[in-house]
Amino acid sequence: MTTVGTVRLTKARQHVLGVPWEERQWAERFGARWAEDVRRWVINTEQLPDELLPYASKPFSWERWIEDDINSGHDVVPPALSPEPQGSVVLRGYQQTGTETALRAWLAGYPGFLIADETGIGKTLEAVQTGRLMKTGRALVICPLSAIPVWRAAIPELDVHGRIRWCVLNYESSKKLLVPPARALQAKRQRTRNRRISKDGTSRVNWDLVICDEAHRLGNPVSQQSSVVRRLTSEADQDRGRRPFVLWLSATAGQDPLKLSYLAPLLGAVTGKPVRDLADFGRWCSDQGIAIRKAAFGSWEWAPDSEEQRQHDLFRMKQLLYDYPVPAAIRRHPEDIAGWPKQQRVAVPVELGAAAQRLYRQAWLQFRQEMQLAHRGRNPADRRAAYLRFRQKASLLKVPAVVQLAKDALEDGYQPAVSFEFLESAEAFVDQMGAEPVAVITGDVKGDAREQQRLRFQRGEARVVVFTITEAISLHAGEQLVGGNNTRRKSIVADVRRSAIQQLQIEGRTHRDGQLSISYMVYATGTVEKTIIDRAIQRMNDLKTMQGDVDIVDLETILSMTVA
């Protein structure tokens, strides 16, 4: 054993692995074992075998949290597995304003704050910066599965020195953060066990800050996810006798007053009438003059009996959240601060699973070998063929992550328009969407059949469209001549094109005719795909400059406009 400063270094470290159930035999083959005390796969070794690297605990994961606890005082996180501090993103003025407003709520003693800015403004960075300026110790982020890579990329950009201990996981996994009560352990059925944990479990960690991304997912107060979050943020379940400060992030916080029940602690603090449980929230609504009534199974429902009452209720909630001297929430529209409807672009990192990582490495090695051979032979056609094969393989490996992004968009009330470059990826996407109807517009779909597919999407008969062509189709909201709906569109560019013309054409399928549609540019972390975005942006700027445009695309803006 050696010592560096005051930190002891041992040759071996307990690595906690994220091994999918179906791949456990592969992990066992290379030395991993199941540890019942932490209920995780572990291995004690100085350096992970290459075969187990894809399962290594990821930065800010719950597995990494457990791993650091196990090795506390005996080791340091291996540099190869640590998030690399970036520090290259500087918050813009309106993002600083959002952070400052959240801090005012914290200093005023509010239990939390709602960041309700429209998509693309930068709620993720505002939340991370708020935690950093609070000088919080332990911060939890609960978000959709597809947003985890975004948070992992954003945190080291601002918390460069790692002064906050972060944990990031998705809503479906948040139950693991609760200690099961005795009555849950006695349950014979898993469903009963889960229900009892979510209702009566206690937090394993005393959190200082909890960030609920896409918080509108908590709009159903009786769901297990809502129950788990209430337990994680409950004052009664914190050893120090105080609840953590909660940041709720959502561009679509709720469609009626009762859908904001997850904000009950905040609303109670604003009005000086504490809300302890759901029954209290019903009474609180009545005290505010909001029209509610008892519904089935003891729940409440919003029931305005006139348009006047409806407007009163909506205005009252808006007033409570936004109009107090110290506001409880902030909401800005892109057109208010950035001159919209200007096209906005967001780089979306996605993470490949262990098996996909292995396939990617194989494809990359093969690609490099073929490129070297082609270069020596000086045959441009060979180089193009090698590049095309590599892009096809990389595209296919991203399909599961793109499917998750599309499903998240549907849950958030959008109609996603998904662009792939390759037919095989589009077909795999349709297959993996399962029962969800998908309109398909590819080169194989001709004439009237193509128009029928387009109309299915425009009218909402198929809520998702996947397309490989880049021009001559309209997929924007509100196409009046064909009876199109007004559901907002989300453009997911699964394969960013090298051609600036093609890339701009793809964006124009949904962002047109005065309709706003942000372009989400997908890339796989740990691969060379981000460089494709860099090159595409440079070519787009070349094209714009040549045309005399003043609207130049800024890579820093794309990276700072993270999904939230």
Image: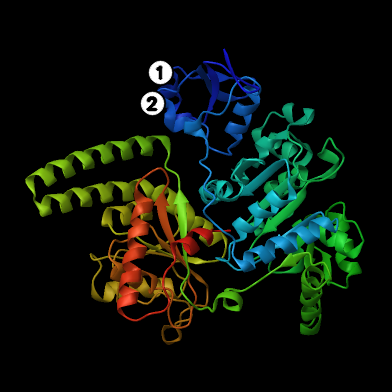
Residue topped by disc 2: 51
Vertically, is 77 above or below 238? above
Do labels 2 and 1 touch, CB within 8 Å? yes
Residue matched to label 1: 29
Q: Secondary structure at mark 2?
A: helix
Specify whether 366 is left or right of 38: left
Residue placed at 70% from the left, 36% from the top? 192
> Could you say where residue 70 lies in the image, as x and y percent from the top left?
63, 23
Marks 2 and 1 sit apart, C-alpha to C-alpha, by 10 Å
**Three-letter amino acid code at the position of disc 1:** Arg
Say whether residue 503 is left or right of residue 347. Answer: left
Q: Which residue does the image show at 45% across and 75% down from the upper left?
A: 459
Q: Is residue 282 visible?
A: no
Q: Classify residue 482 as left or right of residue 160.
A: left
Q: Residue at x 89, y 65 (%)?
A: 271
> Where is the C terminus found, in terms of image quarters?
bottom right
Q: Residues within 10 Å of mark 2 (few under 14, many from 20)?
A: few
